[in-house]
Each structure stands twice: as C-alpha cells, then as structure tokens.
Image: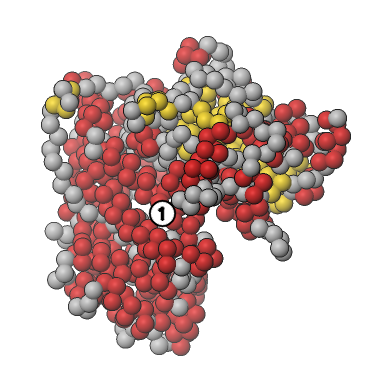
Amino acid sequence: MLRFSGLRGRAVRLALFFAASLPLIIVAPEPASAQLGGVDLDTIQAGRFDYGKMWTFEYAPADYFSETYGFDANPEWFERARLSVLRIPGCSASFVSPHGLVATNHHCVRGRVAGLSGDGEDLLSDGFVARTLADERRIPGYYADQLIQVQDISDQVFAATDAATEEDRDDARSQVVTEIQAQLKAEYASGGDSIWVQVIGLYNGGRYSAYVFRRFTDVRLVVAAEVELGFFGGDPDNFTYPRYDLDFSFLRVYEDDQPYQPTHYFGWGAGVEPGDAVFIIGNPGQTNRLKTIAQLEYQRDVSVPANVHFLGTRLGVLADYRKADPAGARELGIRNWMFGLSNSLKANTGRLEALNQPVIMARKAAAERKLQEAIAADPALSAAYGDVFDRLAAIQVQKREYAAYTGAFAGMGSTFAGSITMARAMRAQTVLNAIADGEPEEEMEQLMTELRRVRDRAPEVEVGFLAHRLADFERYLGADHPVTQAALGGMEPEAAARAMLENSVLDSGEETLAAIEAGTLGVDDPMIALMAEMFPLTSEFRWTSGALQGEENDLQAALGRARFEVYGSEIPPDGSFSPRIADGIVKGYPYNGTLAPAYTTFYGLYDRYFGHGEGVGIGEEWSLPERWKTPPEGLDLSTPLNFVSTTDSYGGNSGSPAVTPDLELVGLNFDRNINGLSRDFIYLPEQGRNVMVDVRAIRAALEVVYDANRIVAEMVWGTLYETEEEADAAAM
C-alpha cells in the first residue's frame, strides 16, 4: 500500500503536469519452463553483440570495422562520416552534395510540407519539386545540427559528483555540466555560428559526453514526393517487409542566403547487392538494452501491457470516427493521427512479444550473470557496486505496489492520446490553486500559457477519449474507489463522459478562459469537482513515484560505471538520440515459411497497387498518385526499390544514410521489420532487419517521373544548376 507524505505549495500544483506518460497494469505471467522446444534455457549464453552495434564516435570501433569489412577505418574516415551526417527534428539526414543538398525521409518532413502550400496548392498530396534554386522553400522554425566535436567529460562530472553529498549531487552535476557547456560554446563559436552544446549521459549515466553541434537554421524544401508514394502502404505495411515505399525527400541548407558548401558529404552510390557491407549513421532513440532482468520483467509484466491497452483503446476511437464520418476524418487529419498511435501500438506489441520470449530473457539473464561475476571477482568493484542489482530489483517490487495508481492517473495531461477536457481540467486546477495562493504574475502567465495550448477537439472523438479515461479509473482502481464513483456517478463510462461534457465549460477553451477571467470556475463544474477528488492523491502519487524513479536513475548510473569498468567501449551504450554509426550487411531472411528477399522492385509496387488499390477497393493505403497509376514510360520496373540489412537501427534513425565502406550513399533508412522490434532490448541479426529506400529507385523517380534533372546532376556529379532548363541543356 502507498504511504504518502504531505505536500505543499508549488510542488503540489505542478505534480499533475508531469504524470507518467502511459497507464500501467499488472499482468502476472506463467513462470517460464527451463525447457523450451528441447532447448535447455539454463545453457543459453549471451551473444557478442546482444547489446547491439550503435557505436559512438567518441569510442569509434576502428579496429573492428577494419578487420570485419577489410578497409582502413582511420580517423579521417570517421571524421568524414560524422561531418556528413545531420540531426533534424526527430530524425536523421545527411549532406549529399558540395552545395548543401540534404537527403532524408519523406515522413521526417511530411508534417512541414503541408504548411508550405500556397493558395490553391496541396503540396502534401501533389508533391513538390523546386524547378529552380529560387523555388526552394524555407521551412519556418526548422533546423539541422552537424556534430563538429565530441568530448568525453566523464572525469570532470564524476570529480564533481563524487565530492558532493548525496543531497547535493544533482546540483553539483548540473553546475559542472553548465560550466562545460559554456566553455565549449565559447571555444567553438565563431563568425556568427550557432553553436549548441548537449551533454548526454551514456551507459545510463555511467559516462558523460559533450556534443558540440553547429546549428543551421535556414533549411529549405527541395523535393518531396506525393504522400501516396512517400507513405505507400500506410499503417498496414508499417514495421513490415517486403516493402515498397519511396520514403525520401531532399532539403538544402543555406548560409547567408546562399547554398551552404559543406566540407564533407556522401557521394551518390551505384547501389548494393546481397552480402555487401553497409553502415547506418544517425541518431537512434532511447533503448533499454542495459536494463537489468528485474527491470525488464517489470516492463513485461506491468508497463508494456498497459501501454498496449491504452493505445489500442484510443486508436479504436479514431477508427470508429473515421468509419462513421470519412469526410470529417479527412478534414481533421485522422489518418495521420491514427498512424502515430498505431505506430506506437505496433512498437509496444513487438516489445511485449520480445519480452515474453523465454530465449531472449535467458540470453539477457546470461549477460547479467556474466557482469555480476566480473564485479564480484574484483574487490574494489564489489565494494562499490555489489549490491546494485539487488537494490534495483527491490525498487521494481515497490513500483508494482502502485501500478494501479499509475494506470489510473498517468497520461491524463497528454493532448495527443488523452482526453483534452481532462488535460484542460488539470491545467485549470493548477491555475485555480495558484490564484488562491496569490502566486506572482510571472508564474500565473506560465500556467495560463499551458492552459491556452490545449486546443478543442471534434466532440465525438473527445467523448470516446474521455469515456476510456473514466473506464480506466474503474479498470485500475475498482468500482468502489472514490475517484471512480466521482467520475462515473453510477453511469456507464460513455454516458458519464457525455454528461460531463454537456455540463462542463472545460470542453471549450474559450469558455474555460472566460470562466477563469470571471472567477466563476469552481467545483460546481463536474470536471473541476472530479479534479478536486483526484488532485491530492495524484499529486502525492507523483511525488512518491518520482522519488523512486530518482533512486532508480542513480542506481542505473552506478551500474553503468561498473559496466564500463568491466567492458569499456566493447559494449555500446543504449540509444539516446545522439550520433551513432552501426554496421551490417545486406541480407534477406526466412519469413512465414518462405524467404524475404534482400531487395524489392517497382514490380512489387505495382503488384501491391493492382492487388490492393484502385479497382479492388481494399484500402487507400495502396493508392497511387495519378502520374504513377500507369507505369511511366522509361521506368525500369526491375529497379531495386527497398532493401534490408542486418544493421542496427532504432526510432530516430529515420532518414539515416546507408553508406558503403567508401562512404557512398546507397539508401535511406526508414523502418524496421516486425522482428526488429525486439531491438529495444536486444540486437538479434538472425531475422531483425532495418528497411531502406534504394538510391537507384530515388534516381529513377527523379529522372523519369519528376523530371528533376537539376537535382540528379547535383547529387550524382556535384554540379549545381540554377534552373531545370540549364540542367536539361547541359545533358544534351
């Protein structure tokens, strides 16, 4: 049972804002047998690369690359690779010409393309090709970061934190990090450069690196295919292979209103064949490969099943709305919204399947035992870190005690997957508390800004989202809990949701602000009344769970230091959306009783279209733009379209260049297959694959379909033409 201490002041008001992202539920699994299909689980050993191949540039695996792939992976090679790659919002990209041309995925810029449409234009549907240099369109608020330097600053950070008391450790860390950031920014800033220094804890805080980025803020759209090409197959094909997706776009970096001239960029390659080595360079997101078995079991039994439930129910609301009102759904962009939720649902489903595979857990357990034995064998390490595993396991037990509270109250502040009325009520309650406490104007304005950011939503969608939130109260807390009773009032969840929305001003942003201004918003509003019942419990719950998470973070950092003491850089750190380089080979794999080929072709694209698209009526996901419906004259349908490799990748690697040992671009990473979803926890190259757009397909589309010879000339030969006419004339 939870035991809460009293909370006062600003912490109480803000605690609700920072609730955990998704609900949790306890699911007790059956104990795994020591035997599985004739395999003795106790004899399973960890593989050399179970922790993956997301290598950092500060610990570059030069000898391993050279020995494995037969080329000289010298410092100059890594420098060229590093300086050719860019990090863009949520994705990766790379320079592919001496004139600042940048290649990335279509889905990385899809959300920005629509906003660049002028009167009478629909660039998302119709695509965009800048016919002249002057036609390239600047993307407001967009940027691209180039890693110009990276430093291991672990010694400075640990010197500061080890000298501090436990209570002052966080402050000591923050102070030294701030000092290092300021020093490096001053050192590398010159001539108006925009320098951003990011300090990232690697190995869960076992090491620290300072990444110095040059930020380019003038980035312009050059080419974007029609969304039907860039998003071909939609959600059904997501996390699958074989795949037929032209998920590419081109941008350009400008400096002083002129195309930027990078010192390093990737040349345009001729393509790859099965067995060829490829390297993915980009920014993989957060993984959980260094978690202990106890932590993974908690995710398997508690958090991930809850995520699946949460996402599945909310996705169902959108699906029902789309079916009932197709025109309204199109106007509201429900399809893209559904894709975001479905992407998360598929990812969580794949993670859960991986965690429920006894062989995977046995391999993780074997790796953990090996580390424990190494720590125990070293007296100094044993004294410093010998109890870390047990303490982490104890925290997971404590977390299980309040899983129901997490499930009931977490994620309510989300305006993407949660009820906006509930999110608005949370923020409104903090405002009312701040008014009552006479908080200063600066804080009040901050709270009001958060409240104004909550936008209204289609009523039927909101009814569904709120109804599921109320149902979750009953699911997690039980029908007799005071919060459940206050929420449902004896009604079914949907009826209760409709009643709340009909009688609350909080379903309207405008009415909410007016009520606060007039001083009339109070407990007579059903949503505020519910907040009054929930607020003390949610606030103290968040405080308690936050304290536990802080302790867990400290223990993970200690384990990270121990791990690095034992293995050094032999094991790469978890993904952290920081620049990495990963290696692998182009290779198909066994699939559904057959073989998935190393690459697909345009033949397959048209097979999907004619089998599932227009005239068949199965789904719009496989429709094609008008100029693609009949294979364009001159398009070689045998051209490789997508290909797969064993290269380690993760979310955030979208848009990452796939390059050869000669650092020639041969593809753009855009997805993983379903077998690759286990990469959150373990790297298994037997069937897990990353999926890429082949450069041969990109060139064919530009030349044959889009008549973009200006871009082809630049990316293949490095020649910049001002207009398409100039490029065409030079080609004659």
Amino acid on which the number 1 mark rests in the picture? Leu
Residue drawn where x is 75% and y is 30% of the image: 718
Q: Is residue 573 left or right of residue 547?
A: right
In the rendered image, the quadrant that contains the C terminus is top right
Residue 193 in view, yes or no: no
Residue drawn where x is 46% and y is 82% of the image: 511
> Of 618 and 506, which appears nearest the observer?
618
Q: Is residue 708 left or right of residue 280?
A: right
Residue found at the very far front of the displayed protein: 615
Q: Is residue 135 left or right of residue 230?
A: right
> Of 647 and 299, which appears nearest the observer?
647
Q: Is residue 302 left or right of residue 578?
A: left
The answer to whether residue 597 is above or below residue 346 is: above
In the rendered image, the quadrant that contains the N terminus is bottom left
Residue drawn where x is 19% and y is 64% of the image: 477
Residue 387: where, in percent of width, then height? 20, 34
The answer to whether residue 23 is above or below residue 73 is: below
Residue 150: where, in percent of width, then height? 54, 32
Residue drawn where x is 64% and y is 23% of the image: 270
Residue 627: where, in percent of width, then height? 67, 46
Report which quarter residue 407 is drawn in.
bottom left
Report which quarter residue 655 is drawn in.
top right
How many numbered discs, if any?
1
Which residue bears the numbered disc 1?
Answer: 341
The answer to whether residue 227 is above or below residue 244 is: below
Residue 439: where, in percent of width, then height? 42, 75
